[in-house]
Image (cartoon, rainbow, N blue to C red):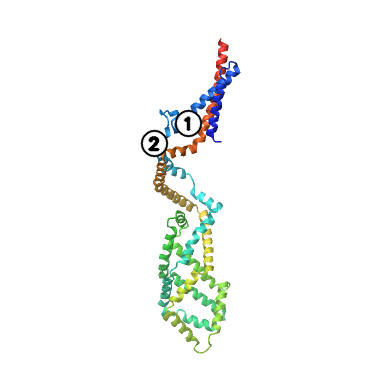
Amino acid sequence: MNRKSQATIVLIVMTAGTLLTVNNTCFTGGLIHNGFMAAMIGGLADWFAITAIFKKPLGISWRTAILPRNRQRIMDEIITFIGEDLLNTANIMKDIIQYDMSKMFIIYLEKLGGRKRLKETVQPILIGLLQNFDSNRLAAIVQKIIKKDKQEYILKDTLIQVSSHLTDELVFAKLMEISYGISLKILNDEKTQAVFEPVIHEIKEEYKKGSTLREMIIAMFDLSDENLINIIKKNLITKLEHLKDSESDEYKAVFDWLQNLLAGLPQNKKYDDFFKTVEDELIYKINITAYLKNYIDNYKNNDTNAEYVIGMVNHIVDDAINAFIQNTVAHESFDNWLKEKLSLFVTKSSPFILQMVRDKLNSYSTESFITLIENHVGNDLQMIRINGSLVGGIAGMLLYMLTYFAERMLG
């Protein structure tokens, strides 16, 4: 049973009680009669008042049907209140400015799973870089860099020496060191940098487009184009360093592979010329762009490499978060940056939110507007009727007692 029915039943009971106790001359009968009557009057008064909010009780139009008559003014006041108070940038920022956003963010990272979510957000950046390299451009530039130094015969002398003494681990170690130097030269070449920059910039801009969280992450970890290139170069250099480390698995795998490869080479007087021919023909004369492109594409599509990138991302994020937590200067910078972004967001969004509220309110007809309010506050208003009957009944009984004893004392 809803509250409206309960309030109506209370009013009916009080009315019936009033009628049934009429002409009762004894003290108890008069007390009960006056209690019922006052409760009935209080219930009727509150029924009239509450009904007058929504419609015309008993057809009386004077000062009744308050909501239907003032619908537009009420909506305008609601919109004004929301616009000038709830969505006011100054009011919102006055509260936000009191909070240490950096401290809240650190709590989010450490205790609310934010560290994991950041990793899941940042991973697509490097995965995207891996999968969206322009292998044609990169292969062409690498070939051009190699051919530029033809006159220096970077590989000739080394290949001749290594081919005759490859079983000597010291020689192989030297080969790995030279290869490391060549690779560093390619990585540090300005033209290689020129290939990385537009690709990384385009992927980063596409990644953060329309996402404040991603933009925040890029800003917080200072993932500028230059820093991203440096991160990639740093990890490539780490890989190269493993190749020249005689204790690493990578080093041993390359050593075994080269031994097996050279075991089948013919051992004759043209041995020295063979490697020079290989260098001239395979590196300087043949277009190796297709081979490089194929290697790059295979690397991109290798699931193991993707897993390596994910592991690298996790390591980078952990290091960055730990560094951020310990850096008080970064805390202040992040706090100011986030509050500035929030202020801009509120300023830009307030008019749209306010217009949405205005459109939604204006879409209600008078009947649906009244129904909406009744559904939300109707039960509470009906309690006023019930309480009015109870309070009225108690007041009526007290007033009867006062007048009864006053008459006896003064009479």
Q: Quadrant of residue 35?
A: top right
- Residue lying farthest bottom? 269
Picture quarter with the C terminus: top right
Badge 2, how many Cα within 10 Å: few under 14, some, many 20+? few
Q: Is residue 362 left or right of residue 257?
A: left
Where 359 sits versus 168, above or below? Answer: above
Q: Position of residue 109 (x, y in %)?
A: 53, 53
On the question of residue 54 being in view, the answer is yes
On the question of residue 395 being in view, the answer is no
Q: Quadrant of residue 71?
A: top left
Picture quarter with the N terminus: top right
Residue nearest the viewer, comparing 286 with 375? 375
Image disc number at residue 172: none
Where 22 sits versus 266, above or below? Answer: above
Q: Position of residue 115 (x, y in %)?
A: 53, 56
Secondary-structure class at tag 2: helix
Amino acid type, label 2: Arg
Q: Which residue is mark 2?
A: 73
Q: Position of residue 405 (x, y in %)?
A: 57, 14
Image disc number at residue 50: 1
